[in-house]
């Protein structure tokens, strides 16, 4: 009788955040403001001018958070009583359908500013 030489240990489902690697990927550190809940990987963040803390980009604001700064590299829980350190992608080629924005913002709201910052977008077919 033949022995089973293959065993499935786990599964992996890519999140499809990247659209390619034609553009170098650079990262940077940010400090996320506390009490924002859980911010998902792929959330576009901006920096509040007065505090230098990061929050999801929101075009209706005038405190600096209307200007995109980067894309969260990981899901981060900000429900703690202190601000949270995180990492963002500052450049690269990303799937526009995998991004999350603050307020009612969409890709169209920020695409030009993201491109100016070195973040390029295209639409991928989901896995």
Image (cartoon, rainbow, N blue to C red):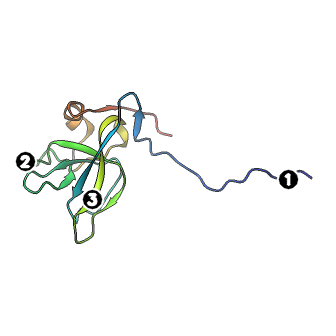
Q: Secondary structure at mark 3?
A: strand
Q: Residue at x 25, y 44 (%)?
A: 70
Residue topped by disc 1: 3
Q: Residue furthest right?
A: 1
Q: Residue at x 27, y 59 (%)?
A: 85
Residue topped by disc 3: 85
102 w.r.t. 82: above or below:
above
Disc 2 to disc 1, how far (Cα)?
A: 66 Å
Where is residue 79 shown, x and y percent of the image?
Answer: 27, 68
**Of the numbered discs in the image, which one, if any, rests on residue 50?**
none
Residue topped by disc 2: 62
Where is residue 47 shown, x and y percent of the image?
Answer: 16, 50
Disc 2 residue crowd, few under 14, some 14–19, many 20+, Cα 10 Å: few
Disc 1 residue crowd, few under 14, some 14–19, many 20+, Cα 10 Å: few
Q: Nearer the viewer, mark 2 or mark 1?
A: 1
Disc 1 to disc 3, how far (Cα)?
A: 49 Å
98 w.r.t. 20: above or below:
below
Along the line of sight, the residue nearer the viewer: 22 or 66: 22
In which quadrant of the rendered view does residue 75 lie?
bottom left
């Amino acid at each position: 009788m033949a022995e089973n030489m293959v065993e499935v240990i786990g599964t992996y489902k890519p999140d499809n955040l990247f659209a390619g690697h034609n553009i170098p990927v650079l990262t940077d550190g940010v400090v996320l403001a506390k009490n924002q809940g859980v911010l998902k990987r792929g959330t576009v963040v901006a920096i509040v001018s007065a505090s230098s803390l990061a929050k999801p980009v929101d075009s209706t604001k005038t405190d600096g958070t209307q200007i995109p700064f980067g894309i969260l590299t990981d899901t981060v829980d900000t429900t703690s009583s202190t601000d949270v350190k995180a990492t963002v992608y500052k450049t690269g080629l990303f799937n526009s359908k995998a991004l999350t924005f603050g307020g009612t913002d969409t890709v169209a709201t920020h695409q030009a500013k993201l491109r100016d910052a070195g973040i390029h977008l295209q639409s991928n077919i989901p896995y």
